[in-house]
Image (spheres, rainbow, N blue to C red):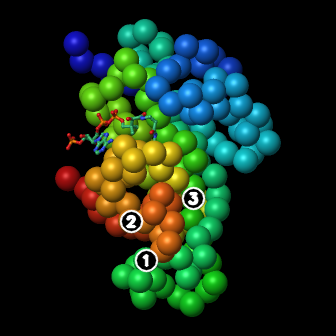
Amino acid sequence: MSHRFAIEALSRDHDRAAFVCGNERIDSYFRTAVSQDVKRKYATCFVARELSSGRVCGFYTLSSSHVPLTEVPAHFAMKLPRYPSVPAVLIGWLARDRDFAGIGLGEALLFDAIKTVAMAPIGAHAIFADAIDAPALAFYEAYGFTALKDQPRRLYLPVATALSALKP
Ligand SMILES: CC(C)(COP(=O)(O)OP(=O)(O)OC[C@H]1O[C@@H](n2cnc3c(N)ncnc32)[C@H](O)[C@@H]1OP(=O)(O)O)[C@@H](O)C(=O)NCCC(=O)NCCS
């Protein structure tokens, strides 16, 4: 059966209680804490809702942040101005419910996050993400994210590079 989704800003209408991605830290954060972060504007949160069932089946969060220039991989840093830090957006969390594994939903969430950052009316040169475990690291690396210097789980990708990968 094919699934169709809308990706939209988190609202009170989204039922988060039954969400299970398999990682307890992420599940607990999404079920109980994300709305507080959104309320305080520490993060924005976007959810994937299955159109046929209304079920919440994935989400990601974005927060403004920066990366010290000294931590940016050399091949990216050499092209950048010598300001001490690079304006960036952090993908704090990104996950899909395990009932929707392997159908491209993780990729759809990541691409939507990249487009959201690229279209935002606030400068952000790069996207970065913290990989919670080895599979998450492999997922991000498959899309061109590169580890920051001396931080193998902190992943970095210029927005322009990410966008060019999205073009058909
Ligand atoms: C990581 C995660 C979002 C991937 O979502 P998914 O829906 O299973 O992945 P998709 O079906 O969209 O797969 C997209 C591509 O990524 C690849 N991929 C998925 N998980 C991968 C992994 N662990 N390692 C390498 N590649 C991976 C798929 O093979 C696919 O590539 P293909 O089209 O060439 O076959 C999902 O496993 C998840 O929610 N995990 C728990 C939460 C988590 O770890 N989040 C990330 C850090 S916060």
| Amino acid type for the residue under numbered disc 1 | Pro
Which of the four quarters of the rendered structure image does ligand 1 lie in?
Answer: top left
Give neighbour class at mark 3: few <14, some 14-19, many 20+ (Cα, 10 Å). Answer: many
Disc 2 vs disc 1: Cβ atoms closer than 8 Å? Answer: yes
Image coordinates of residue 11 in percent, x first then y, are 65, 25
Task: Tell me: residue 154, above or below residue 36.
Answer: below
Comes first in the chain, label 2 or label 3: 3
Q: Which residue is mark 2?
A: 146
Residue 131 appearing in the image: yes
- Residue occupying image coordinates x 68% and y 20%: 12
Comes first in the chain, label 2 or label 1: 1
Q: At numbered mark 1, what does the secondary structure look like: helix, strand or loop?
A: loop
Q: At numbered mark 2, what does the secondary structure look like: helix, strand or loop?
A: strand
Q: At numbered mark 3, what does the secondary structure look like: helix, strand or loop?
A: strand
The residue furthest left is: 168
| Amino acid type for the residue under numbered disc 3 | Val
Q: Which residue is mark 3?
A: 89
In front: 43, or 166? 43
- Residue occupying image coordinates x 27% and y 28%: 103
Q: Nearer the viewer, mark 3 or mark 1?
A: 1
Q: CA distance from mark 2 to mark 1?
A: 8 Å
Q: Image check: 42 left or right of 142?
A: right
Q: Which residue is mark 1?
A: 73
Task: Tell me: residue 82, above or below residue 61.
Answer: below
Say if disc 2 is inside 8 Å of ligand 1: no
Residue 115 appearing in the image: no
Give neighbour class at mark 1: few <14, some 14-19, many 20+ (Cα, 10 Å). Answer: some
| Amino acid type for the residue under numbered disc 2 | Thr
| Image quadrant containing the N terminus | top left
In front: 73, or 10? 73
- Residue occupying image coordinates x 35% and y 32%: 105
